[in-house]
């Protein structure tokens, strides 16, 4: 007989560690979006750790909730999803800098963006577990189950991976691949091919349903599928610190006159006050953006791009 009390402690420790990872990753994303910090690798690194932690949570959770039978396969996905939802909701009012440089858009994360984040994560977890399990059973041919079930499971996981990869590439139709993978995996659980074997092979039973839930979330996210990640990458690439860029220009007055044209007169007085020491740099930039708008930011972005292209 299995004694669930032996698994409660490791399950609780892993789950607490998972919650910490989620909140640290969200904090790093917040700093990237708000301040343009060069921390892109932090969420990715923590995400990799979280992936293996979730597998551990699932393994120990199965035995912790052993006597709840099939209810465990509902409880575990909920326990994994809830911290993600709470963390993203808690940081949904992040100041997301669209052109990053004193133009700040206060944007509340929509429901479609939220599910567009959670869906791919669940798909990745489900696909990775199914892929690993099917590979082992194809390689060793355990229990005499044959090769049709592992091959079909392997095929489903590849479709899911393809959907996520398309999402990373900015193809919103990748969500339909994720949904298809989930539908096939779940349907295969109810198609018998031998006396004790069904078409979709899964050791823990819940993996196809985890993949299916993720696929559904991907579909209902519509065009916001993976958009949060893509926007974060775009913002990082577009980030520009105008305070730093100003210091790189030898003749700021001549530069602004040439680039702004007729708009130059709108900031002439502010520039003279800044150069005379009557205004600090931050106040000058804020005043210029207020009077001219995006054009003031764009000229510095164009200059930075030009410098990079010359390298």
Image: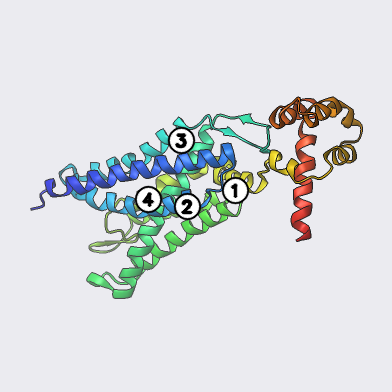
Residue position marked by numbered label 3 in the rendering: 88
Q: Which is more N-terminal, label 3 or label 2?
A: 2
Estimate the x, y position of residue 181 in percent, counting from the top left.
45, 55
Residue position marked by numbered label 1 in the rendering: 233
Residue position marked by numbered label 2 in the rendering: 44
- 214 sits to left or right of 286: left
Location of residue 255 by image quarter:
top right
> Few, some or many C-alpha atoms within 10 Å of disc 2 (few <14, some 14-19, many ≥20)?
few
- Disc 3 from disc 1: Cα separation: 17 Å
Location of residue 289 by image quarter:
top right
- Disc 4 from disc 2: Cα separation: 10 Å
Residue position marked by numbered label 4 in the rendering: 50
Element marked by disc 4: helix
Element marked by disc 2: helix
| Viewer can see residue 87 | yes
**85 lies above or below 283:** below
Q: Which is more N-terminal, label 4 or label 1?
A: 4
């Amino acid at each position: 007989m299995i004694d669930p009390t032996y698994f409660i402690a490791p399950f609780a420790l892993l789950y607490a560690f998972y919650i910490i990872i989620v909140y640290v990753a969200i904090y790093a994303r917040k700093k990237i979006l708000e301040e343009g910090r060069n921390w892109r690798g932090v969420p990715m690194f923590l995400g990799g750790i979280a992936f293996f932690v979730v597998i551990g949570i699932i393994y120990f959770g199965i035995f912790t909730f052993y006597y709840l039978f099939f209810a465990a396969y509902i409880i575990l996905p909920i326990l994994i999803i809830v911290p993600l939802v709470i963390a993203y909701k808690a940081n949904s009012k992040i100041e997301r800098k669209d052109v990053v440089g004193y133009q700040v858009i206060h944007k509340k994360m929509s429901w479609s963006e939220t599910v567009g984040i959670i869906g791919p994560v669940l798909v990745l977890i489900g696909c990775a577990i199914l892929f690993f399990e099917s590979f082992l059973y194809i390689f060793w041919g355990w229990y005499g189950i044959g090769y049709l079930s592992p091959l079909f499971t392997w095929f489903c996981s590849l479709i899911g991976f393809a959907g996520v990869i398309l999402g990373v590439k900015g193809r919103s139709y990748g969500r339909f691949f994720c949904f298809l993978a989930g539908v096939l995996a779940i349907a295969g659980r109810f198609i018998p091919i031998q006396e004790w074997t069904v078409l979709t092979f899964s050791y823990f039973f819940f993996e196809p349903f985890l993949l299916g839930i993720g696929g559904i979330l991907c579909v209902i996210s519509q065009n916001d599928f993976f958009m949060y990640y893509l926007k974060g990458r775009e913002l990082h690439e577009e980030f520009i610190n105008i305070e730093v860029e100003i210091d790189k220009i030898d003749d700021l007055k001549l530069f602004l006159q040439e680039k702004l044209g007729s708009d130059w007169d709108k900031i002439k007085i502010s520039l003279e006050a800044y150069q005379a020491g009557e205004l600090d740099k931050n106040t000058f930039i804020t005043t210029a953006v207020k009077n001219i708008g995006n054009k003031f930011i764009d000229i510095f972005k164009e200059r930075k791009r030009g410098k990079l292209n010359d390298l």
